[in-house]
Image: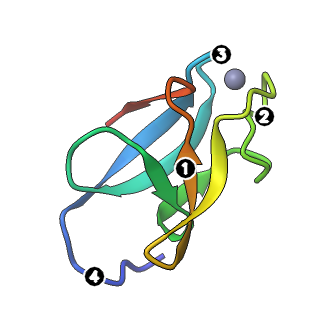
Amino acid sequence: MPAKKKGRTHIIKVYCAKCQTLLYKYQKAGLGSLIKCYKDRIAEDHTRGDLKCPKCDETFAREAVYHGKPANRIIRGKVYVRS
Ligand SMILES: [Zn+2]
């Protein structure tokens, strides 16, 4: 998926905090903690698209819109990330 803007993005891996299952590979812009995932920046989606961990069924995000773009708002403490 081509990025719209050439910017400083990097791929991070988003894991379920409960069972350590890989949920997304996500193209993150900037530093700082992960608060939301824009849907069009999810590079690889390992979930069933229902915002739940495919392994332990824990809900880790909520549907949201940021700046007019659909996004998944991460529920604090439900995921951890690695670069
Ligand atoms: Zn899980």
Q: Which residue is mark 3?
A: 19
x, y percent for residue 54: 78, 34
Residue 32 location (% of width, % of height): 24, 41
**Mark 1 neighbour density, 10 Å: few (under 14) some (14–19) many (20 or more):** some
Q: Residues within 10 Å of mark 2 (few under 14, many from 20)?
A: some
Residue denoted by label 4: 5
Q: Amino acid at mark 3?
A: Cys
Q: CA distance from mark 2 to mark 1?
A: 17 Å
Determine the secondary structure under disc 3.
loop
Q: Earlier in the sequence, mark 4 or mark 1?
A: 4
Disc 3 + disc 2, Cβ < 8 Å: no
Q: Position of residue 78 (x, y in %)?
A: 57, 26
Q: Quadrant of the C terminus?
A: top left
Q: Secondary structure at mark 2?
A: loop
User: Mark 2–mark 4 contact, CB under 8 Å?
Assistant: no
Viewer-nearest of labels 1 and 3?
A: 1
Above or below for 53 versus 7:
above
| Disc 1: which residue | 73
Callout 2: CB less than 8 Å from ligand 1 = yes
